[in-house]
Amino acid sequence: MVAVRALTLWQPWASVVAAGAKLVENRPWKPAASLLKPGERFAIHGGAKYDELGRAAAISVLGGDAAYGILSRVGKAPAVLAVATYVGVVERFDDPLVPAGQGAWFSGRKGGSSPT
């Protein structure tokens, strides 16, 4: 059996990342090098919590049609939605979905997320 690390995200963010519309996940901490190294794959897990403000932000930033297409597929039960390749942490990223002052886990599209 192969162990796979996972990153749990609130919905709808897990679905937005799994669809490739958001390439980063903002966290104030970096993953420990002993847990996740650049080039390693990890699962994107959609958690049970739903972020209503996140839904509005996704619609605003991604645009109505793209956002609604992704959000219409958001499930209610927690589940693994995709597998991504960890590229590294960036301290500055020009992305409106990354709050100022936070680093971002970058999964990029160099292998990117692939739906499960």
Image (spheres, grey):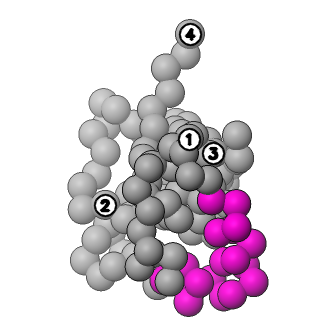
Residue toward you, 45 or 25? 45
Asked if the magenta segment contains residue 77, the reply would be no
Q: Is residue 68 left or right of residue 22?
A: right
> Measured from the top left, where is residue 83 in percent x and y?
61, 42
Given this view, does label 1 or label 4 mark the residue nearer the observer?
1
Is label 4 in contact with label 2 (beta carbons under 8 Å)? no
Residue tagged by mark 1?
79
Q: Residues within 10 Å of mark 3 (few under 14, many from 20)?
A: many
* Label placed on residue 27: 2
Between marks 1 and 4, how big is the CA–CA gap? 19 Å
Task: Give the answer, above or below, for where 39 lies relative to 96.
Answer: above
Q: Earlier in the sequence, mark 4 or mark 3?
A: 4
Residue tagged by mark 4?
1
Residue found at the very far top of the displayed protein: 1
Q: Residues within 10 Å of mark 1 (few under 14, many from 20)?
A: some
Q: Which residues lie in the magenta part? A: 57-74
Q: What amino acid type is highlighted by mark number 1?
A: Ala
Between marks 2 and 3, how big is the CA–CA gap? 19 Å
Q: What amino acid type is highlighted by mark number 2?
A: Arg
Asked if the magenta segment contains residue 58, the reply would be yes
Q: Secondary structure at mark 1?
A: strand
Between marks 2 and 1, how big is the CA–CA gap? 21 Å
Given this view, does label 2 or label 1 mark the residue nearer the observer?
1
* Label placed on residue 82: 3
